[in-house]
Amino acid sequence: MVWSTESVIMAIVGGALIGLAASLLLIATGRIAGISGILGDLLKPSAGDKQWRVLFIFGLFVTGSLGVVFMPEQIQTPQDHSLGAVVAAGLCVGFGTRLGSGCTSGHGICGLTRFSKRSFVAVLTFMATGFITATAIQIFTGGNI
Amino acid sequence: MNRLFAFLAGILFGVGLIVSGMTDANKVIAFLDVADGWDPTLAFVMVGGIGAHLALFKLITSKDKPWFEDQFFLPTAQDINIKLVVGAALFGIGWGLSGYCPGPALVSVASGAKEPLALVCAMLMGMLIKELAFREKTPQ
Protein backbone atom coordinates (compact mmCIF):
# COMPACT_ATOMS: atom_id res chain seq x y z
CA MET A 1 0.00 0.00 0.00
CA VAL A 2 1.13 3.52 -0.82
CA TRP A 3 0.11 6.11 1.72
CA SER A 4 1.48 8.54 4.28
CA THR A 5 0.36 9.67 7.73
CA GLU A 6 0.30 13.26 6.53
CA SER A 7 -2.09 12.55 3.66
CA VAL A 8 -4.36 10.53 5.96
CA ILE A 9 -4.55 13.48 8.37
CA MET A 10 -5.35 15.81 5.46
CA ALA A 11 -8.05 13.38 4.28
CA ILE A 12 -9.67 13.36 7.74
CA VAL A 13 -9.40 17.14 8.18
CA GLY A 14 -10.67 17.79 4.63
CA GLY A 15 -13.48 15.31 5.18
CA ALA A 16 -14.43 17.06 8.43
CA LEU A 17 -14.56 20.40 6.57
CA ILE A 18 -16.90 18.79 4.02
CA GLY A 19 -19.07 17.55 6.90
CA LEU A 20 -19.07 21.03 8.44
CA ALA A 21 -20.04 22.57 5.09
CA ALA A 22 -22.93 20.11 4.77
CA SER A 23 -23.99 21.02 8.33
CA LEU A 24 -23.79 24.76 7.58
CA LEU A 25 -25.95 24.37 4.46
CA LEU A 26 -28.45 22.28 6.41
CA ILE A 27 -28.83 24.62 9.37
CA ALA A 28 -28.93 27.78 7.24
CA THR A 29 -31.05 26.66 4.27
CA GLY A 30 -32.46 23.28 5.33
CA ARG A 31 -30.94 21.66 2.22
CA ILE A 32 -28.87 18.52 1.74
CA ALA A 33 -25.36 19.14 0.38
CA GLY A 34 -25.59 16.72 -2.50
CA ILE A 35 -23.60 18.23 -5.34
CA SER A 36 -25.28 16.31 -8.17
CA GLY A 37 -28.70 17.32 -6.86
CA ILE A 38 -27.76 20.97 -6.34
CA LEU A 39 -26.40 21.14 -9.89
CA GLY A 40 -28.88 18.81 -11.59
CA ASP A 41 -32.02 20.45 -10.21
CA LEU A 42 -30.92 23.63 -12.02
CA LEU A 43 -31.71 21.78 -15.25
CA LYS A 44 -35.31 21.16 -14.23
CA PRO A 45 -37.56 23.73 -15.92
CA SER A 46 -39.73 23.98 -12.82
CA ALA A 47 -36.99 24.65 -10.28
CA GLY A 48 -37.90 27.89 -8.52
CA ASP A 49 -35.00 28.01 -6.09
CA LYS A 50 -32.14 28.49 -8.50
CA GLN A 51 -30.22 31.29 -6.80
CA TRP A 52 -28.81 29.46 -3.77
CA ARG A 53 -27.83 26.54 -6.03
CA VAL A 54 -25.89 28.81 -8.39
CA LEU A 55 -24.19 30.51 -5.44
CA PHE A 56 -23.19 27.22 -3.82
CA ILE A 57 -21.62 26.07 -7.10
CA PHE A 58 -20.01 29.49 -7.55
CA GLY A 59 -18.49 28.95 -4.07
CA LEU A 60 -16.92 25.70 -5.28
CA PHE A 61 -15.52 27.52 -8.31
CA VAL A 62 -14.10 30.37 -6.21
CA THR A 63 -12.39 27.84 -3.95
CA GLY A 64 -10.98 26.08 -6.99
CA SER A 65 -9.55 29.36 -8.29
CA LEU A 66 -7.83 29.97 -4.95
CA GLY A 67 -6.75 26.34 -4.66
CA VAL A 68 -4.90 26.51 -7.96
CA VAL A 69 -2.85 29.39 -6.53
CA PHE A 70 -2.28 28.19 -2.95
CA MET A 71 -2.42 24.38 -3.16
CA PRO A 72 -1.80 23.57 -6.84
CA GLU A 73 -0.40 20.11 -6.03
CA GLN A 74 -3.80 19.13 -4.62
CA ILE A 75 -5.63 19.77 -7.92
CA GLN A 76 -4.49 17.24 -10.50
CA THR A 77 -6.01 15.99 -13.75
CA PRO A 78 -6.01 12.25 -14.56
CA GLN A 79 -2.77 11.19 -16.26
CA ASP A 80 -2.80 9.15 -19.46
CA HIS A 81 -6.54 9.62 -19.92
CA SER A 82 -7.79 10.63 -23.36
CA LEU A 83 -10.45 13.31 -23.64
CA GLY A 84 -12.76 10.66 -25.10
CA ALA A 85 -12.49 8.62 -21.89
CA VAL A 86 -13.11 11.72 -19.78
CA VAL A 87 -16.20 12.64 -21.83
CA ALA A 88 -17.57 9.09 -21.56
CA ALA A 89 -16.95 9.24 -17.81
CA GLY A 90 -18.73 12.59 -17.52
CA LEU A 91 -21.81 11.23 -19.30
CA CYS A 92 -21.90 8.26 -16.89
CA VAL A 93 -21.42 10.53 -13.86
CA GLY A 94 -24.12 12.99 -14.97
CA PHE A 95 -26.73 10.45 -16.03
CA GLY A 96 -25.93 8.01 -13.22
CA THR A 97 -26.00 10.48 -10.34
CA ARG A 98 -29.37 11.82 -11.47
CA LEU A 99 -30.90 8.41 -12.07
CA GLY A 100 -29.51 7.20 -8.73
CA SER A 101 -30.50 10.43 -6.92
CA GLY A 102 -27.06 11.27 -5.60
CA CYS A 103 -23.28 11.04 -5.62
CA THR A 104 -20.39 10.77 -3.17
CA SER A 105 -21.68 13.78 -1.20
CA GLY A 106 -25.46 13.33 -1.18
CA HIS A 107 -25.40 9.57 -0.63
CA GLY A 108 -21.86 9.13 0.75
CA ILE A 109 -21.73 11.86 3.39
CA CYS A 110 -25.29 13.14 3.93
CA GLY A 111 -27.20 9.91 3.27
CA LEU A 112 -25.01 7.65 5.41
CA THR A 113 -25.17 10.22 8.21
CA ARG A 114 -28.98 9.92 8.13
CA PHE A 115 -28.66 6.10 8.09
CA SER A 116 -30.61 6.05 4.82
CA LYS A 117 -30.99 2.54 3.44
CA ARG A 118 -31.15 3.90 -0.11
CA SER A 119 -27.85 5.71 0.38
CA PHE A 120 -26.25 2.62 1.89
CA VAL A 121 -27.20 0.60 -1.21
CA ALA A 122 -26.08 3.42 -3.54
CA VAL A 123 -22.70 3.82 -1.82
CA LEU A 124 -21.99 0.08 -1.88
CA THR A 125 -22.96 0.01 -5.57
CA PHE A 126 -20.91 2.97 -6.78
CA MET A 127 -17.91 1.95 -4.68
CA ALA A 128 -18.09 -1.55 -6.19
CA THR A 129 -18.32 -0.38 -9.82
CA GLY A 130 -15.74 2.35 -9.14
CA PHE A 131 -13.23 -0.19 -7.79
CA ILE A 132 -13.96 -2.65 -10.62
CA THR A 133 -13.64 0.02 -13.34
CA ALA A 134 -10.41 1.60 -12.10
CA THR A 135 -8.83 -1.78 -11.37
CA ALA A 136 -9.86 -3.25 -14.73
CA ILE A 137 -8.46 -0.22 -16.59
CA GLN A 138 -5.14 -0.66 -14.77
CA ILE A 139 -5.00 -4.40 -15.50
CA PHE A 140 -6.05 -4.26 -19.16
CA THR A 141 -4.58 -0.96 -20.33
CA GLY A 142 -1.92 -0.12 -17.74
CA GLY A 143 -3.91 3.02 -16.88
CA ASN A 144 -3.61 4.34 -20.44
CA ILE A 145 -7.08 4.93 -21.73
CA MET B 1 -29.49 35.25 3.60
CA ASN B 2 -29.85 31.65 2.51
CA ARG B 3 -28.02 32.66 -0.68
CA LEU B 4 -25.08 34.08 1.28
CA PHE B 5 -24.86 30.95 3.41
CA ALA B 6 -25.14 28.69 0.38
CA PHE B 7 -22.15 30.54 -1.05
CA LEU B 8 -20.21 30.20 2.22
CA ALA B 9 -21.08 26.49 2.42
CA GLY B 10 -19.89 26.07 -1.17
CA ILE B 11 -16.57 27.70 -0.28
CA LEU B 12 -16.10 25.52 2.81
CA PHE B 13 -17.12 22.40 0.89
CA GLY B 14 -14.60 23.23 -1.83
CA VAL B 15 -11.81 23.80 0.72
CA GLY B 16 -12.62 20.39 2.21
CA LEU B 17 -12.46 18.72 -1.19
CA ILE B 18 -9.08 20.30 -2.00
CA VAL B 19 -7.49 19.66 1.42
CA SER B 20 -8.74 16.07 1.52
CA GLY B 21 -7.16 15.11 -1.80
CA MET B 22 -10.46 14.50 -3.61
CA THR B 23 -9.54 17.03 -6.31
CA ASP B 24 -6.44 15.01 -7.24
CA ALA B 25 -7.92 12.71 -9.88
CA ASN B 26 -4.83 10.49 -9.84
CA LYS B 27 -5.17 10.00 -6.09
CA VAL B 28 -8.82 9.05 -6.56
CA ILE B 29 -7.86 6.55 -9.26
CA ALA B 30 -5.09 5.16 -7.00
CA PHE B 31 -7.76 4.71 -4.31
CA LEU B 32 -10.16 2.89 -6.64
CA ASP B 33 -7.47 0.87 -8.44
CA VAL B 34 -6.44 -1.94 -6.10
CA ALA B 35 -4.14 -3.57 -8.67
CA ASP B 36 -1.33 -1.02 -8.81
CA GLY B 37 -0.10 -0.14 -5.27
CA TRP B 38 -3.40 0.58 -3.57
CA ASP B 39 -3.66 3.96 -1.80
CA PRO B 40 -6.52 3.71 0.75
CA THR B 41 -6.09 7.31 2.01
CA LEU B 42 -9.34 8.70 0.59
CA ALA B 43 -11.44 6.28 2.65
CA PHE B 44 -10.61 8.61 5.56
CA VAL B 45 -12.43 11.49 3.84
CA MET B 46 -15.63 9.62 4.49
CA VAL B 47 -14.58 9.03 8.12
CA GLY B 48 -14.00 12.76 8.69
CA GLY B 49 -17.05 13.83 6.69
CA ILE B 50 -19.56 11.50 8.29
CA GLY B 51 -17.99 12.04 11.72
CA ALA B 52 -18.36 15.83 11.55
CA HIS B 53 -21.83 15.76 9.98
CA LEU B 54 -23.10 13.07 12.35
CA ALA B 55 -21.93 15.09 15.36
CA LEU B 56 -24.05 18.06 14.24
CA PHE B 57 -26.96 16.47 12.35
CA LYS B 58 -29.14 15.55 15.34
CA LEU B 59 -28.55 18.97 16.89
CA ILE B 60 -29.52 20.75 13.67
CA THR B 61 -32.61 18.73 12.85
CA SER B 62 -33.89 18.88 16.43
CA LYS B 63 -34.68 22.52 15.70
CA ASP B 64 -38.14 23.33 14.30
CA LYS B 65 -36.72 24.91 11.17
CA PRO B 66 -33.44 26.10 9.66
CA TRP B 67 -32.23 29.70 10.06
CA PHE B 68 -33.52 31.10 6.79
CA GLU B 69 -36.26 28.74 5.62
CA ASP B 70 -39.54 27.55 7.09
CA GLN B 71 -38.69 23.86 6.90
CA PHE B 72 -35.96 21.30 6.34
CA PHE B 73 -35.87 19.72 2.88
CA LEU B 74 -34.78 16.17 3.67
CA PRO B 75 -35.19 13.31 1.17
CA THR B 76 -38.29 11.22 1.81
CA ALA B 77 -37.84 8.36 -0.69
CA GLN B 78 -37.44 4.97 0.98
CA ASP B 79 -37.71 2.34 -1.74
CA ILE B 80 -34.68 0.61 -3.12
CA ASN B 81 -35.39 0.33 -6.84
CA ILE B 82 -33.68 -0.43 -10.11
CA LYS B 83 -33.10 3.27 -10.89
CA LEU B 84 -31.14 3.74 -7.67
CA VAL B 85 -28.92 0.72 -8.32
CA VAL B 86 -28.37 1.26 -12.06
CA GLY B 87 -27.76 4.97 -11.53
CA ALA B 88 -25.24 4.39 -8.75
CA ALA B 89 -23.53 1.68 -10.82
CA LEU B 90 -23.16 4.02 -13.83
CA PHE B 91 -21.88 6.81 -11.60
CA GLY B 92 -19.25 4.45 -10.14
CA ILE B 93 -18.09 3.49 -13.64
CA GLY B 94 -17.65 7.16 -14.57
CA TRP B 95 -15.90 7.87 -11.28
CA GLY B 96 -13.48 4.96 -11.69
CA LEU B 97 -12.85 5.85 -15.32
CA SER B 98 -11.93 9.50 -14.71
CA GLY B 99 -11.24 9.98 -10.99
CA TYR B 100 -13.92 12.69 -10.88
CA CYS B 101 -17.14 12.79 -8.93
CA PRO B 102 -19.30 15.93 -9.34
CA GLY B 103 -17.89 18.15 -6.54
CA PRO B 104 -14.19 17.78 -7.32
CA ALA B 105 -14.94 18.16 -11.05
CA LEU B 106 -16.66 21.52 -10.43
CA VAL B 107 -13.81 22.71 -8.18
CA SER B 108 -11.18 21.56 -10.71
CA VAL B 109 -12.79 23.45 -13.60
CA ALA B 110 -11.24 26.59 -12.10
CA SER B 111 -7.77 25.20 -12.86
CA GLY B 112 -8.40 25.82 -16.55
CA ALA B 113 -7.27 22.28 -17.45
CA LYS B 114 -9.19 20.67 -20.31
CA GLU B 115 -10.06 17.37 -18.56
CA PRO B 116 -12.30 18.74 -15.77
CA LEU B 117 -13.95 21.15 -18.22
CA ALA B 118 -14.69 18.31 -20.65
CA LEU B 119 -15.96 16.17 -17.78
CA VAL B 120 -18.29 18.87 -16.44
CA CYS B 121 -19.71 19.58 -19.92
CA ALA B 122 -20.34 15.86 -20.48
CA MET B 123 -21.77 15.55 -16.95
CA LEU B 124 -24.27 18.35 -17.64
CA MET B 125 -25.17 16.61 -20.89
CA GLY B 126 -25.71 13.33 -19.03
CA MET B 127 -27.89 15.11 -16.46
CA LEU B 128 -29.92 16.71 -19.24
CA ILE B 129 -30.38 13.36 -20.99
CA LYS B 130 -31.73 11.95 -17.73
CA GLU B 131 -34.14 14.87 -17.38
CA LEU B 132 -35.45 14.36 -20.89
CA ALA B 133 -35.61 10.55 -20.66
CA PHE B 134 -37.33 10.41 -17.26
CA ARG B 135 -39.76 13.27 -16.93
CA GLU B 136 -41.03 12.99 -13.38
CA LYS B 137 -44.08 14.78 -12.11
CA THR B 138 -43.54 14.11 -8.42
CA PRO B 139 -40.63 15.85 -6.71
CA GLN B 140 -37.86 13.49 -5.60
Image (cartoon, coloured by chain):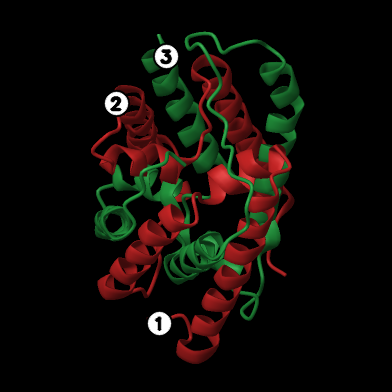
- On the image, numbered disc 1 is attached to which residue? A144
In this rendering, which labeled residue sits more in front, label 3 or label 1?
3
| Pointer 3 residue | B2
Q: Could you tell me which chain the residue with mark 3 belongs to? A: B
B51 versus B117 height, above or below: above
Chain A, chosen colour in render:
red
Within 10 angstroms of label 3, few (less than 14), some, or many (20 or more) residues?
some
Q: For numbered disc 2, what is the local secondary structure?
A: loop
Residue A71 in picture, x, y percent from top left: 45, 40
Q: Nearer the viewer, residue A45 or B50?
A: A45
Q: Cβ–Cβ below 8 Å for labels 3 and 1?
A: no
Q: Which chain is green?
A: B
Can residue B24 be seen here? The reply is yes
Q: Earlier in the sequence, mark 1 or mark 2?
A: 2
Q: Label 2 amino acid?
A: Gly
Chain assignment, label 2:
A
Across and down, in percent, residue B77 comes to: 58, 44
Amino acid type at mark 3: Asn
Q: Which residue is mark 2?
A: A48
| Residue toward you, B68 or B134 | B134
Chain letter for mark 1: A
Q: Residues within 10 Å of mark 1 (few under 14, many from 20)?
A: few
- For mark 1, give the secondary structure: loop
Q: Can you tell which quarter of the image residue B47 is in? A: top right
Q: Is residue A85 above or below residue B51?
A: below
**Percent of width and height locating residue A72:** 41, 45
Task: Tell me how far mark 1 sits from mark 2, CA to CA.
Answer: 43 Å
